[in-house]
Structure formats: structure tokens, C-alpha cells
Image (spheres, rainbow, N blue to C red):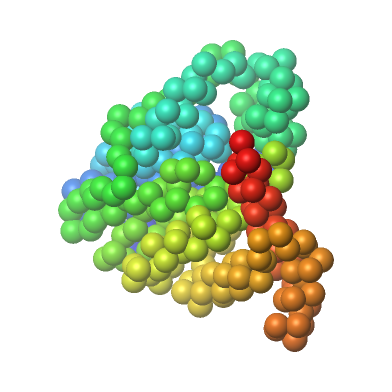
Amino acid sequence: MLKKLTERIYYMPHNNDTDRPILGLVCGDKYSLIVDSGNSPQHAKEFLAEVKSLNIPPVKYLVITHWHFDHVFGIKEMNLTTIGHENTKIKLEEMRNMKWDDASLEVYLQNGILNEFEISCIKKEIPERDSFLIGDLDITYKGSMAIDLGGINCIINDVGGDHTLESTVIYIPEEKVIFLGDCVYNGRYNGDYVFTKEKLFPMIDKIEKNDIEYYFCSHESICDKEEMDGFWHQLKSTGNIVEKGTSVEEAKRKFTATYKRPPSEAESFFIGGFVNGNKSMKEKAHH
């Protein structure tokens, strides 16, 4: 079901059952633009059916926030002028050489390419995968690009972070709205969840240079400025506690001494991520 945030911004909420991310719709005076294609042709089809019922300018563009399956498996179904980072294009080309039958999915599980939850979502969303094909990008960018939809602009930026190399955000200055994709989430290294100050903190600074009232994170409810400020504070406070070589236990003790309270469940997760991030950077430096 599509929801309306402003006169120009609509979205389909996320669904954690099969890892469906938020899909966004930005409506200009001349054209409209979709953010992310969904985790399956069916997801894309349902979204397009909702969009078709609206009295809006024609949908011309699709912007992909990053290459992960839950954001790109609906590209062919959308059949729009598709825009994404040049690294997203490289990853899509790699994925087009992959097979998606049950036996291949099992191999990907054993090799750590996909996890059990991701595979279960793919099987539920796309039960018949014999003819399933990965779509492609029509336009690639690096750094930044802007699209004028008529009376409203979409500023597309790569912001980095730990989740993927090319995490892309879409900022609509006239509406003070930003679609963050998954850029706020952790990365993974050797099966561990990781955060690094070196990537995360500059990413936050890039995002917060914009005048924003509403934030879309792909697998969350909409956040307002106050909520997002609280989230950034949690990330920065836990990241600053974790020094090189610090263990999780040491970091938690330092957090408790610094803030006069033990870390929350979320803060404990972030601490673990920063500890893992330090380990991953050390291992990479030795290779």
C-alpha cells in the first residue's frame, strides 16, 4: 500500500518478512522518479500497480541505491531509465553470470555469498526462477548528479559508509527529504558485522550538510530530524569509545564510565561492530 508523505513524495513501506525495502516515488511537474526496484519482480509489480492509480506525471526514472539483491531484483520489471553508481553496474554484471536455482543458492550459502535469511526471501519472493534475469543500468554516475523533474530536483550522491562501496542517497531539497538506502547499516567482513569510523563518520558529515526533515532508511519507519540526530549520536558515541585494539568488554566498561550508564542493546551492537571493524582493518593491512 502506497503512503503519502508530502504532495510530491510517496512510498511503499518496508516488509521484514521477506526483506522488502522501502520503495520511494518522487513526483515533479514533468516527470516522476522511483527509488529502488524492490527485491523481486513481484515486489516491483505491486509497487507499479499502486503508482498507476495515482494522478501524477509519467514515471521516467529509476534510481538504485546499491547493488544488494533486495534493491535490484525488480529492475527488469520496472523497465525504466535506470540510474546507479558505476560500481553498482559492475556488481550487476557479476550477478548476471550467477544462477538462481535451488542448487546454486545452496552453493552461495556454503561460500558465504548469501545467508540463510536472504536465500529464504529469494525463494519466497521468486518461487519460479528458471527465467529470472538481472536488469542493468542505463546511466551510471560517480560522485554526484542531479535530475530536474520539473519544479523539483533529485540530487544523487555517493556517500560511502560501511554497507557498500557505492551507497547512493537521493536528496530532494525542495521537500527536505532524503532516501538513504542502506548506507546507515553495517558492512560485513568474514561473516562479522562491521562499522568503521574511517568510513562512517565522513558519511554522516556528507549527509548532514543537507537541510533534511525526513529520512528514509530502507528497512525502517520514516525518521524525523530529532530521531536521526539521536541515531547519529549513538553511532558516534559508541565509535569514539572503541579505540584500536579495544575489546567489546573494555569498550562497554569505558562506555559505562563515560556516560554513567551501561550501553543499550543497540549501543552494544554498535560497539561490537566497531570492534570488528578495527579487526577487519588490521587484517586487511597485513594482506
- Residue extending farthest to the right is 249
Residue 19, percent from left and from top: 63, 43
Residue closest to the far bottom: 260
Name which residue lies at 70% across and 30% down: 112
- Tell me the quarter of the image containing the C terminus: top right
Is residue 23 visible in the rendered image? The answer is yes
Q: Would you place residue 192 above or below residue 226 in this image?
A: above
Which residue is depicted at the point 75% across and 86% down?
260
In terms of image quadrants, where is residue 128? top right
Question: As displayed, is residue 79 above or below residue 152?
Answer: above
Instruction: Left or right? Give the position of 263 relative to 130.
Output: right
Relative to residue 187, is residue 242 depicted above or below?
below
In the rendered view, would you say 35 is above or below 249? above
Location of residue 207 in the rendering, given as x and y in whole percent from the top left corner:
40, 63
The residue sitting at the front extreme is 286
Residue 100, position as x, y percentages in the image: 62, 19
Q: Is residue 266 visible?
A: no
Towards the viewer: 138 or 19: 138
Q: Residue at x 24, y 56 (%)?
A: 153
Q: Between residues 118 and 257, which one lies in front from this camera angle?
A: 257
Q: Name the residue located 75 percent from the left edge and 25 percent from the top edge.
A: 110
Indicate left or right for 58 with 68 as reference: left
Front position in the image: 112 or 96? 112
Counting the numbered discs, the total is: 0
